[in-house]
Image (tube, helix red, strand yellow):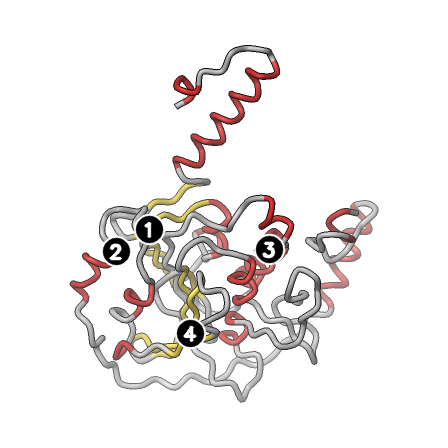
Protein backbone atom coordinates (compact mmCIF):
# COMPACT_ATOMS: atom_id res chain seq x y z
CA UNK A 1 0.00 0.00 0.00
CA UNK A 2 2.95 2.36 0.59
CA UNK A 3 3.82 2.55 -3.10
CA UNK A 4 0.19 2.92 -4.12
CA UNK A 5 -0.94 5.51 -1.58
CA UNK A 6 2.19 7.43 -0.57
CA UNK A 7 5.01 7.47 -3.13
CA UNK A 8 2.81 6.77 -6.16
CA UNK A 9 5.28 4.29 -7.66
CA UNK A 10 2.45 1.91 -8.58
CA UNK A 11 -0.68 2.84 -10.53
CA UNK A 12 -2.92 0.04 -9.23
CA UNK A 13 -3.13 -2.15 -6.13
CA UNK A 14 -3.87 -5.85 -6.61
CA UNK A 15 -5.02 -8.09 -3.76
CA UNK A 16 -3.87 -11.30 -5.46
CA UNK A 17 -2.52 -12.68 -8.76
CA UNK A 18 -5.94 -12.99 -10.40
CA UNK A 19 -6.77 -9.41 -9.53
CA UNK A 20 -3.38 -8.31 -10.91
CA UNK A 21 -4.11 -10.06 -14.22
CA UNK A 22 -7.53 -8.41 -14.38
CA UNK A 23 -6.03 -4.98 -13.79
CA UNK A 24 -3.33 -5.62 -16.40
CA UNK A 25 -5.91 -6.60 -19.03
CA UNK A 26 -7.97 -3.52 -18.21
CA UNK A 27 -4.94 -1.27 -18.66
CA UNK A 28 -4.04 -2.85 -22.00
CA UNK A 29 -7.63 -2.52 -23.19
CA UNK A 30 -7.47 1.25 -22.77
CA UNK A 31 -4.35 1.76 -24.87
CA UNK A 32 -5.06 3.82 -27.96
CA UNK A 33 -3.76 3.30 -31.49
CA UNK A 34 -2.86 5.76 -34.19
CA UNK A 35 -1.36 5.85 -37.66
CA UNK A 36 2.31 6.72 -38.07
CA UNK A 37 3.05 10.04 -39.76
CA UNK A 38 4.80 10.01 -43.11
CA UNK A 39 8.54 10.63 -43.28
CA UNK A 40 10.23 13.11 -45.61
CA UNK A 41 13.77 12.20 -46.65
CA UNK A 42 16.11 15.05 -47.55
CA UNK A 43 19.55 15.35 -49.08
CA UNK A 44 22.37 14.36 -46.76
CA UNK A 45 24.45 17.26 -45.43
CA UNK A 46 27.77 16.30 -43.79
CA UNK A 47 28.31 17.56 -40.22
CA UNK A 48 29.89 21.01 -40.02
CA UNK A 49 32.41 19.74 -37.47
CA UNK A 50 35.07 17.10 -38.03
CA UNK A 51 34.44 13.57 -36.79
CA UNK A 52 38.07 13.45 -35.66
CA UNK A 53 37.15 15.89 -32.88
CA UNK A 54 35.35 13.03 -31.14
CA UNK A 55 38.67 11.56 -30.01
CA UNK A 56 39.29 14.64 -27.89
CA UNK A 57 35.69 15.17 -26.79
CA UNK A 58 35.02 11.67 -25.46
CA UNK A 59 38.49 10.23 -24.85
CA UNK A 60 39.39 7.07 -22.99
CA UNK A 61 38.62 8.22 -19.44
CA UNK A 62 35.08 7.10 -18.58
CA UNK A 63 34.97 9.37 -15.52
CA UNK A 64 35.65 12.55 -17.46
CA UNK A 65 32.44 14.41 -18.23
CA UNK A 66 31.65 16.11 -21.52
CA UNK A 67 28.70 17.75 -23.22
CA UNK A 68 26.85 15.19 -25.33
CA UNK A 69 25.77 18.02 -27.64
CA UNK A 70 29.35 18.13 -28.90
CA UNK A 71 28.98 14.51 -29.98
CA UNK A 72 25.60 15.13 -31.58
CA UNK A 73 27.00 18.03 -33.59
CA UNK A 74 29.55 15.69 -35.18
CA UNK A 75 27.07 13.00 -36.16
CA UNK A 76 23.83 14.56 -37.39
CA UNK A 77 23.29 16.08 -40.83
CA UNK A 78 24.63 19.61 -41.08
CA UNK A 79 25.22 19.61 -37.30
CA UNK A 80 21.64 20.89 -37.01
CA UNK A 81 19.94 19.92 -33.76
CA UNK A 82 16.59 21.34 -32.65
CA UNK A 83 16.79 20.85 -28.91
CA UNK A 84 13.66 20.25 -26.85
CA UNK A 85 13.10 21.53 -23.27
CA UNK A 86 16.66 22.79 -22.92
CA UNK A 87 16.32 24.13 -19.38
CA UNK A 88 14.31 21.25 -17.91
CA UNK A 89 16.00 18.02 -16.81
CA UNK A 90 19.33 19.15 -18.21
CA UNK A 91 21.06 15.82 -17.63
CA UNK A 92 19.01 14.44 -20.51
CA UNK A 93 19.45 16.15 -23.90
CA UNK A 94 16.52 15.70 -26.27
CA UNK A 95 15.68 17.10 -29.67
CA UNK A 96 15.24 16.52 -33.38
CA UNK A 97 17.76 16.22 -36.18
CA UNK A 98 18.36 14.36 -39.42
CA UNK A 99 20.59 11.37 -39.93
CA UNK A 100 21.48 10.51 -43.52
CA UNK A 101 18.46 12.50 -44.60
CA UNK A 102 16.00 10.79 -42.26
CA UNK A 103 14.27 12.73 -39.47
CA UNK A 104 15.31 11.38 -36.10
CA UNK A 105 14.51 12.03 -32.47
CA UNK A 106 17.66 12.22 -30.38
CA UNK A 107 17.93 11.33 -26.71
CA UNK A 108 21.32 11.61 -25.06
CA UNK A 109 22.27 11.69 -21.42
CA UNK A 110 24.49 14.39 -19.99
CA UNK A 111 25.12 12.82 -16.60
CA UNK A 112 23.17 11.10 -13.85
CA UNK A 113 19.43 11.02 -14.55
CA UNK A 114 17.23 12.84 -12.05
CA UNK A 115 13.43 12.74 -11.80
CA UNK A 116 13.15 15.79 -14.06
CA UNK A 117 15.28 14.05 -16.69
CA UNK A 118 13.01 11.01 -16.64
CA UNK A 119 9.90 13.20 -16.83
CA UNK A 120 11.35 14.97 -19.84
CA UNK A 121 11.36 11.67 -21.68
CA UNK A 122 7.69 10.71 -21.41
CA UNK A 123 4.50 12.69 -22.03
CA UNK A 124 1.22 12.31 -20.16
CA UNK A 125 -1.73 12.69 -22.48
CA UNK A 126 -4.31 15.09 -21.17
CA UNK A 127 -7.13 14.67 -23.64
CA UNK A 128 -6.81 11.03 -24.70
CA UNK A 129 -6.12 7.60 -23.27
CA UNK A 130 -2.37 7.20 -22.76
CA UNK A 131 -0.36 6.03 -25.74
CA UNK A 132 2.82 5.12 -23.93
CA UNK A 133 2.43 6.08 -20.33
CA UNK A 134 0.44 8.45 -18.22
CA UNK A 135 1.53 9.78 -14.89
CA UNK A 136 1.54 12.80 -12.69
CA UNK A 137 4.35 15.12 -13.58
CA UNK A 138 5.84 16.06 -10.28
CA UNK A 139 6.19 14.25 -7.00
CA UNK A 140 2.98 15.76 -5.66
CA UNK A 141 0.98 14.97 -8.78
CA UNK A 142 0.12 18.60 -9.42
CA UNK A 143 1.31 19.22 -12.97
CA UNK A 144 -0.24 16.76 -15.35
CA UNK A 145 -1.12 18.56 -18.53
CA UNK A 146 1.76 20.69 -19.75
CA UNK A 147 4.69 18.28 -19.80
CA UNK A 148 6.00 17.21 -23.18
CA UNK A 149 7.22 13.76 -23.91
CA UNK A 150 10.16 13.27 -26.15
CA UNK A 151 9.30 9.66 -26.76
CA UNK A 152 5.64 10.36 -27.46
CA UNK A 153 6.64 13.16 -29.81
CA UNK A 154 8.93 10.76 -31.61
CA UNK A 155 6.12 8.26 -31.89
CA UNK A 156 3.94 10.90 -33.50
CA UNK A 157 1.20 11.54 -31.01
CA UNK A 158 -0.89 13.36 -33.59
CA UNK A 159 -0.73 13.33 -37.37
CA UNK A 160 -0.05 17.06 -37.60
CA UNK A 161 3.16 16.69 -35.62
CA UNK A 162 6.02 16.09 -38.08
CA UNK A 163 7.86 13.68 -35.87
CA UNK A 164 11.38 12.62 -36.28
CA UNK A 165 13.50 9.74 -35.32
CA UNK A 166 16.53 9.40 -33.13
CA UNK A 167 20.17 9.51 -33.81
CA UNK A 168 23.07 7.61 -32.35
CA UNK A 169 23.64 8.96 -28.99
CA UNK A 170 22.45 8.61 -25.50
CA UNK A 171 19.45 6.53 -25.99
CA UNK A 172 16.89 5.95 -28.70
CA UNK A 173 13.52 7.21 -29.66
CA UNK A 174 11.40 8.41 -32.53
CA UNK A 175 8.65 8.09 -34.94
CA UNK A 176 9.07 5.93 -37.95
CA UNK A 177 12.72 6.42 -37.91
CA UNK A 178 15.68 5.39 -35.96
CA UNK A 179 16.41 5.96 -32.34
CA UNK A 180 19.76 6.05 -30.80
CA UNK A 181 21.59 6.12 -27.51
CA UNK A 182 24.78 7.36 -26.12
CA UNK A 183 25.48 6.42 -22.53
CA UNK A 184 28.39 7.34 -20.31
CA UNK A 185 26.36 8.01 -17.22
CA UNK A 186 26.17 5.71 -14.20
CA UNK A 187 22.36 5.65 -14.23
CA UNK A 188 19.54 7.13 -12.16
CA UNK A 189 20.24 9.26 -9.09
CA UNK A 190 19.98 7.37 -5.79
CA UNK A 191 19.77 8.46 -2.17
CA UNK A 192 17.19 9.52 0.39
CA UNK A 193 16.19 12.77 -1.32
CA UNK A 194 15.98 11.19 -4.76
CA UNK A 195 13.82 8.33 -3.48
CA UNK A 196 11.52 10.71 -1.62
CA UNK A 197 11.26 12.78 -4.78
CA UNK A 198 9.88 9.84 -6.74
CA UNK A 199 12.90 8.79 -8.81
CA UNK A 200 11.66 5.17 -8.79
CA UNK A 201 8.26 6.22 -10.16
CA UNK A 202 9.57 8.64 -12.76
CA UNK A 203 12.41 6.35 -13.79
CA UNK A 204 9.94 3.49 -14.25
CA UNK A 205 7.78 5.68 -16.50
CA UNK A 206 10.81 6.49 -18.60
CA UNK A 207 11.74 2.82 -18.94
CA UNK A 208 8.11 2.00 -19.83
CA UNK A 209 8.12 4.63 -22.55
CA UNK A 210 11.33 3.16 -23.97
CA UNK A 211 9.89 -0.35 -23.95
CA UNK A 212 6.60 0.69 -25.58
CA UNK A 213 7.89 3.04 -28.27
CA UNK A 214 7.08 1.48 -31.64
CA UNK A 215 9.71 3.15 -33.81
CA UNK A 216 13.09 1.84 -34.95
CA UNK A 217 15.82 2.48 -32.40
CA UNK A 218 19.57 2.96 -32.69
CA UNK A 219 21.70 2.92 -29.58
CA UNK A 220 25.25 4.21 -29.34
CA UNK A 221 27.06 3.63 -26.05
CA UNK A 222 29.99 6.01 -25.70
CA UNK A 223 30.96 5.52 -22.05
CA UNK A 224 29.78 3.69 -18.94
CA UNK A 225 26.22 2.35 -19.10
CA UNK A 226 25.21 0.81 -15.79
CA UNK A 227 22.17 -0.69 -14.08
CA UNK A 228 18.73 0.77 -14.65
CA UNK A 229 20.31 3.56 -16.66
CA UNK A 230 21.17 1.02 -19.34
CA UNK A 231 17.48 0.11 -19.58
CA UNK A 232 16.35 3.72 -19.58
CA UNK A 233 18.70 4.51 -22.44
CA UNK A 234 17.51 1.54 -24.52
CA UNK A 235 20.17 -1.07 -23.89
CA UNK A 236 20.30 -4.55 -25.38
CA UNK A 237 17.29 -5.75 -23.35
CA UNK A 238 15.01 -3.45 -25.37
CA UNK A 239 16.16 -4.79 -28.74
CA UNK A 240 17.30 -1.63 -30.53
CA UNK A 241 17.58 -2.04 -34.29
CA UNK A 242 21.32 -1.44 -33.91
CA UNK A 243 23.45 -1.15 -30.80
CA UNK A 244 26.97 0.19 -31.13
CA UNK A 245 29.67 0.43 -28.44
CA UNK A 246 32.71 2.63 -28.76
CA UNK A 247 36.03 1.04 -27.65
CA UNK A 248 36.06 2.98 -24.38
CA UNK A 249 32.51 2.04 -23.35
CA UNK A 250 31.49 -0.29 -20.52
CA UNK A 251 28.27 -2.10 -19.53
CA UNK A 252 27.55 -3.71 -16.17
CA UNK A 253 24.93 -4.02 -13.45
CA UNK A 254 26.68 -1.17 -11.63
CA UNK A 255 29.99 0.65 -11.82
CA UNK A 256 33.04 -1.00 -10.30
CA UNK A 257 33.50 1.61 -7.59
CA UNK A 258 29.82 1.51 -6.66
CA UNK A 259 29.91 -2.29 -6.43
CA UNK A 260 33.00 -2.18 -4.23
CA UNK A 261 31.35 0.38 -1.96
CA UNK A 262 28.23 -1.75 -1.54
CA UNK A 263 30.23 -4.88 -0.72
CA UNK A 264 32.38 -2.93 1.75
CA UNK A 265 29.29 -1.57 3.48
CA UNK A 266 27.72 -5.04 3.73
CA UNK A 267 30.93 -6.47 5.18
CA UNK A 268 31.25 -3.61 7.65
CA UNK A 269 27.66 -3.98 8.88
CA UNK A 270 28.10 -7.73 9.29
CA UNK A 271 31.25 -7.25 11.36
CA UNK A 272 29.52 -4.64 13.52
CA UNK A 273 26.65 -7.04 14.20
CA UNK A 274 29.19 -9.66 15.24
CA UNK A 275 30.99 -7.11 17.45
CA UNK A 276 34.17 -7.49 15.43
CA UNK A 277 36.59 -4.68 14.83
CA UNK A 278 36.26 -3.17 11.38
CA UNK A 279 39.44 -2.54 9.40
CA UNK A 280 38.37 -0.48 6.42
CA UNK A 281 41.70 -1.09 4.70
CA UNK A 282 40.87 -4.78 4.37
CA UNK A 283 37.56 -4.01 2.69
CA UNK A 284 39.13 -2.49 -0.43
In the picture, the disc for residue 58 is 2
- Residue at 66 percent of width and 60 percent of height: 139
Sort mark 2 into few (<14), some (14-19) or many (20+) by Cα contacts within 10 Å.
Answer: many
- Location of mark 3 (residue): 204
Q: Earlier in the sequence, mark 4 or mark 2?
A: 2
- Mark sitting on residue 223: 1
- Mark 4 or mark 1, earlier in chain: 4
What SS does tag 4 mark? strand
Within 10 angstroms of label 1, few (less than 14), some, or many (20 or more) residues?
many
In the image, 263: left or right of 127? left
- Residue 95 is labelled as 4
Gap in angstroms between the C-alphas marked 4 and 1:
21 Å
> Viewed as shown, does residue 8 lie left or right of 146?
right
Q: CA distance from mark 3 to mark 2?
A: 29 Å
Circle 3 packing at 10 Å, graded few (<14), some (14-19), many (20+), is some
Q: Secondary structure at mark 3?
A: helix
Which residue appears at 35% of the width and 54% of the height? 221
Check whether the beta carbons of the residues at disc 4 and disc 3 lie within 8 A of each other: no
Give the answer, above or below, for where 1 lies relative to 86: above
Nearer to us in this view, 218 or 135: 135
Find residue 14 and report its horizontal and vertical position in percent.
80, 50
Estimate the spatial distance between the alpha carbons at disc 4 and disc 2, rounded to whole Å: 21 Å
Amino acid sequence: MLYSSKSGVTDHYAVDDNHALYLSRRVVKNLNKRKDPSVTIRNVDPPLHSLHDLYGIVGGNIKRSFDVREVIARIVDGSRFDEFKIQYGDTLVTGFARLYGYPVGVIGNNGVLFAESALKDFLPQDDKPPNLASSSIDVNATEYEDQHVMINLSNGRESHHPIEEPLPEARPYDTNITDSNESWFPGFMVGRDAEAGGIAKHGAKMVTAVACANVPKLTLIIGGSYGAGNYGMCGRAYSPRFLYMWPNSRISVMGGEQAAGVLAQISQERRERENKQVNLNTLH
